[in-house]
Image: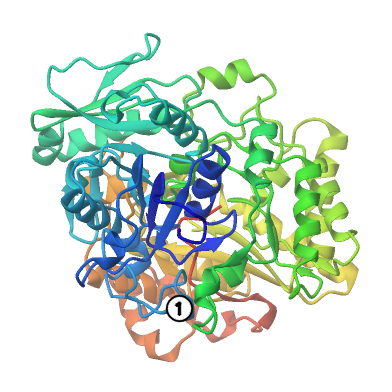
Amino acid sequence: MKALGWDAADVILFTGDAYVDHLSFGAAVIGRILETAGLRVAIVPQPNWTDDLRDFKKLGEPRLFFGVTAGNMDSMVNHYTANRRRRSNDAYTPGGRAGARPDYASVVYTNILKKLYPEVPVVLGGIEASLRRLTHYDYWSDKLKPGILEESGADLLFYGMAEKSITEFARLVQRGVPVQSLTNIPQTAFMNPEGNNYATKTDWEALELNTHEECLKDKKKFAANFRYIEEESNRWQAKKLVQQVGNRQIVVNPMWPPLSTKEIDQVYELPFTRMPHPRYNGKGAIPAYEMIRHSINIHRGCFGGCAFCTISAHQGKFVVSRSEKSVMKEVEAVVDMPDFKGYISDVGGPSANMYRMAGKDLELCRQCKRPSCIYPSVCRNLETDHRPLTGLYQKVAGFPGVKKAFIGSGIRYDLAFHETGDAKKDEGNLEYLREVIRHHVSGRLKVAPEHTSDDVLNVMRKPSFELFRRLTTFFHSVNREEGLKQQLIPYFISSHPGSKLENMAELAAETKELDFKLEQVQDFTPTPMTVATVIYYSGYHPYMLEKVFVPRTEKEKLAQRKFFFWYKKEYRNSLKQELQRLNRPDLEKRLFDAEQQPAGNKRNQSKRKKPKHHKRR
């Protein structure tokens, strides 16, 4: 600040991540947005919350407000496994070192700032705050918690991708408008005393949810709430959500309409250095940065609506795509990086193949409440043409200095196989898959069938396993034609709501017969604001309010997980006993009869890396 000649910052942001000036890191994006708005912005990464709080004091008070984010991940997902065991590393810290942020970082940071500077407004953002904006189940404490504004004491919450909200907020506070009166900004949430009048937009219809106290008493009421929360979060013309907590209300304003291509291009063309701060030199690499340093994000949002995924709740259901010009400008920036060796690690997004996909008639989209555009079937109004994406891949791969452009994001093969009735379009969609397999796979193609049972897949909102069988045939056919030796890597989840032990046994048999040996698959982890988590806690599906089986105990989860590893000798006897108990001699024969053993084709041995937070297909 002294070097810049500032006597004070206008805004000070606190983040649970190390600071990387890259468009994949939320604090950097918001910092650059505010800087572009003419504000003096300071950022304090990973402040020490256990000492004399000097990191919270050293820059003094900002002229306008503090901003707080836990970082790119929910701090609890960052810290703990599905079995609630503490992780030994943190991908967002130099050297992958654990322990640089507290549990529930958004609440801890905000509480400290409110204690030190009670008169200075504090606003919350980031995925942790965004997904905890209303009453939610917290898996790590195993209890229902109120919206994070109640626990943290923050003045305002920005949910989702907050560029437009923070820009509008900054414009108004610069004019001297009190933060307490800023209650009509889209995509924000605030606490309002019961009976207090507040400014709102006249066309925002209010939808009253079951109160926090009612949810504590009745799990079914908590489940019923979520249907409305999800529907309104996915609508273009949504209602304002209101939930009573004690003698106050949490008010969640509707989202902004999706960004235009011009608007998202402007965000991605802010003057990022694409590098970690020099303070980290010599302290070890930041694993999350290493993963994306040579990658290109071409769109945001996801219309898949998977029951276990938070992407649409945070980024929105409507996909917003960058222009080719903007993407190619970033390709040039990556090629110019001193350490670039010619390989782009990913050209993708939350899902690889949703680029430039939107409703044919946007008026229908504005009224739509469907949580997914592709489940239980692909919407007739959805444009699924993959040809623009295939063309973009070819342009990126052909750029001078690029040797290979890989696709590291998960591919929705149900989109590629969808038959539109337009022969040219359908062939173009299959040609997309051929293009990916021929030219953009670094040895492994990642996809996510997640399960084999239709009953479980219906709870998950995933397509039939028959489509994965079709993909397997298609993949190996292209490999034979091209003389390739690639692996198909399917992702699977055990212990998901709706998944019974018998379903996992069937999964083991089905994948064995396709010649897969699965490794490093994962248990379901309940995270705030997903259908699956609501079912896990309440036992009810929020749409039908019917009971759903949920494996909750460690014993149940371990029994399901073992079926992934049917081929390991140490599990053979216990799995046989389980199958006998289930009275399924047919499955025992399929798994363990010597005549049924597969050839052991190594190309289908699936190893699963630790997944990125919620970035699921």
Q: Residue at x 34, y 24 (%)?
A: 177
Q: What's under tag 1, amino acid-wise?
A: Gly
Q: Is residue 419 left or right of residue 469?
A: right
Q: Is residue 466 left or right of residue 419?
A: left
Give the residue pinned by disc 1: 96
Q: Residue at x 82, y 48 (%)?
A: 392
> Looking at the image, is 25 positioned above or below residue 211?
below
Residue nearer the viewer, 156 or 60: 60
Quarter occupied by the N terminus: bottom left
When asked about the image quadrant of residue 555, the answer is bottom left
Residue nearer the viewer, 280 or 470: 280
Q: Is residue 43 left or right of residue 376?
A: left
Residue nearer the viewer, 423 or 138: 138
Q: Residue at x 46, y 68 (%)?
A: 92
Q: Is residue 281 left or right of residue 330?
A: left
When asked about the image quadrant of residue 141, the answer is bottom left
> Looking at the image, is 499 positioned above or below residue 119?
below
Q: Residue 608, position in %: x, y? A: 53, 73
Q: How is the image coloured?
A: rainbow
Q: Residue 354, position in %: x, y? A: 67, 43
> Looking at the image, is 85 positioned above or below residue 132?
below
Q: Residues within 10 Å of mark 1 (few under 14, many from 20)?
A: some
Question: In this view of the protein, can residue 147 be seen by the observer?
Answer: no
In the orientation shown, which residue stands out farthest toward the top? Answer: 202
Q: Residue 180, position in %: x, y? A: 26, 28
Q: Residue at x 64, y 33 (%)?
A: 263
Question: In this view of the protein, can residue 141 be seen by the observer?
Answer: yes
Element at label 1: helix
